[in-house]
Image (cartoon, rainbow, N blue to C red):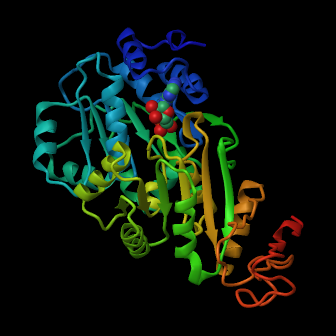
């Protein structure tokens, strides 16, 4: 079904056309008519499914043209990067309207945000903390809000934002339309849904626990002391255009970025200890192709629309299985195929098993040919997280070069 059959306004359709979209994605197909019909919607969809347009397009259609009197749509996002990205998408789709869009997040001065708010805005895209500051300072009111979007609700929960979200929702009129997007619906979000939404319709797109089919993902087991060497070797051998490297900690991300720099890779870092300006520059440089690698903590894993990532490398195995999906979802987006590599040490085995259980898939273990592995590794059947055979020291019966063998393939599930 074409976009023109979904009930969108002509100016919104022009925006869609200008964005180059030909057909709606499944979540757009289902969500757009519901929002236009005034229904509350809960959307669970994998990243890269076109979720932003699924809520932005019907909201733009319903808002029509610029009107004074305060924001009529509020979009809450967990991170500054996501807020900036969603604002950009709104601006793109709204380019044939005179609707005013303002983004509000912390880490930057108040001046420009105050000016925009004073001038009158129709749509606000915000992170919760700074939005509350504005509400408390009286620089913003939410009493005209007709559309409220709680995006990435599970991430809001992870980041401890749910109490802030509730305070914000309380400042919005009861008569409004609410949409909530979340990859998973843990009990706290269920409670939020019951409290904040009216008779919502749930849209589930695809199996939310499976990685995109276009992503090829494998695991490279290695001894802890050789992780960095393996990373460098992978980068040498792989024909990549742009690679996202995920680390567990900010310190680790800085260290790996330093290592890559010393090895002549053009690299940027993205984590929450960087200033807003540094974060923006890192993302922009990566998108523009100025940096071939972006080293990031999980803050970058969720929802960020970074086009053309050819490879994702998990330098550290993610601690939460859902983060694995989010991380590797950065590649293979929009039908472009990609590769995701996870470097795994003996200590990571239990996390890897948890991921495999979560996605109901076994991730193939791969050996990098001609890499000078210091230790032979033999992961045997048995208790998750308990590799046998003296790993990472000498393993039974296998030599480093030659009979190399990762016994996990025989593990029964
Ligand atoms: P999102 O899931 O909102 O982050 O969107 C993921 C990517 O898909 C973005 O680059 C969008 O510009 C793109 N996109 C969204 N909807 C469509 C569509 N109907 N056709 C083609 N690309 C789309």
Quarter of the image with the C terminus in it: bottom right
> Camera-side residue: 363 or 385?
363
Q: Residue at x 57, y 84 (%)?
A: 225
Q: Residue at x 81, y 85 (%)?
A: 388
Q: Residue at x 57, y 75 (%)?
A: 227
Quarter of the image with the N terminus in it: top right
Residue 208 image point, x, y percent: 66, 45
Residue 337 image point, x, y percent: 61, 40
Q: Residue at x 40, y 25 (%)?
A: 59
Residue 161 image point, x, y percent: 40, 58
Q: Is residue 27 left or right of residue 146?
A: right
Identify whether 1 is placed above or below 81: above
> Camera-side residue: 378 or 157?
378
Identify whether 405 is placed above or below 84: below
Residue 73's image quarter?
A: top left
Identify whether 94 is placed above or below 215: above
Q: Is residue 271 left or right of residue 217?
A: left
Asked whether residue 356 appears in the rendered view, the answer is yes
Identify whether 271 is placed above or below 99: below
Count the numbered circles shown: 0
> Camera-side residue: 87 or 368?
368
> Camera-side residue: 267 or 137?
267
Q: Is residue 354 left or right of residue 150?
A: right
């Amino acid at each position: 079904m074409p976009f023109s059959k979904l009930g969108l306004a002509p100016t919104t359709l022009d925006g869609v056309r200008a964005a180059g979209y030909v057909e709606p994605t499944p979540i757009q197909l289902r969500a757009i008519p519901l929002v236009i019909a005034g229904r509350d919607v809960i959307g669970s969809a994998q990243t890269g499914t076109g979720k932003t347009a699924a809520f932005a397009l019907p909201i733009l259609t319903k808002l029509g043209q610029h009107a004074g009197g305060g924001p009529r749509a509020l979009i809450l996002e967990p991170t500054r990067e996501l807020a900036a990205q969603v604002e950009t998408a709104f601006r793109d789709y709204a380019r044939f309207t005179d609707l005013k869009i303002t983004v509000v997040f912390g880490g930057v001065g108040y001046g420009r945000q105050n000016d925009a708010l004073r001038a009158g805005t129709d749509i606000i895209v915000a992170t919760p903390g700074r939005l509350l500051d504005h509400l408390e300072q009286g620089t913003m009111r939410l009493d005209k809000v007709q559309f409220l979007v709680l995006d990435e609700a599970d991430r809001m929960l992870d980041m401890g934002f749910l109490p802030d979200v509730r305070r914000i929702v309380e400042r919005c009129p009861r008569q409004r339309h609410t949409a909530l997007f979340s990859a998973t619906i843990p009990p706290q979000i269920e409670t939020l849904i019951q409290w904040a939404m009216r008779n919502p319709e749930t849209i589930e797109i695809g199996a939310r626990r499976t990685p995109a089919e276009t992503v090829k993902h494998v695991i490279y087991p290695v001894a802890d002391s050789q992780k960095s060497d393996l990373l460098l070797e992978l980068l040498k051998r792989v024909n990549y255009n742009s690679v996202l490297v995920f680390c567990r900690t900010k310190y680790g991300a800085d260290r790996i970025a330093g290592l890559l720099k010393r090895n002549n890779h053009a690299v940027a870092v993205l984590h929450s200890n960087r200033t807003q300006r540094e974060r923006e520059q890192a993302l922009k440089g990566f998108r523009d192709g100025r940096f071939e690698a972006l080293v990031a903590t999980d803050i970058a894993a969720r929802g960020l629309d970074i086009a053309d990532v050819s490879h994702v490398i998990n330098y550290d195995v993610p601690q939460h299985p859902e983060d694995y999906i989010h991380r590797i979802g950065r590649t293979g987006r929009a039908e472009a195929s990609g590769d995701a590599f996870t470097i795994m040490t003996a200590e990571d085995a239990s996390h890897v098993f948890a991921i495999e259980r979560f996605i109901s898939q076994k991730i193939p273990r791969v050996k990098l040919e001609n890499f000078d592995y210091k230790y032979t590794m033999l992961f045997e059947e048995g208790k998750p997280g308990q590799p046998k055979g003296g790993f990472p020291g000498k393993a039974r019966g296998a030599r480093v070069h030659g009979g190399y063998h990762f016994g996990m393939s025989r593990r029964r599930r």
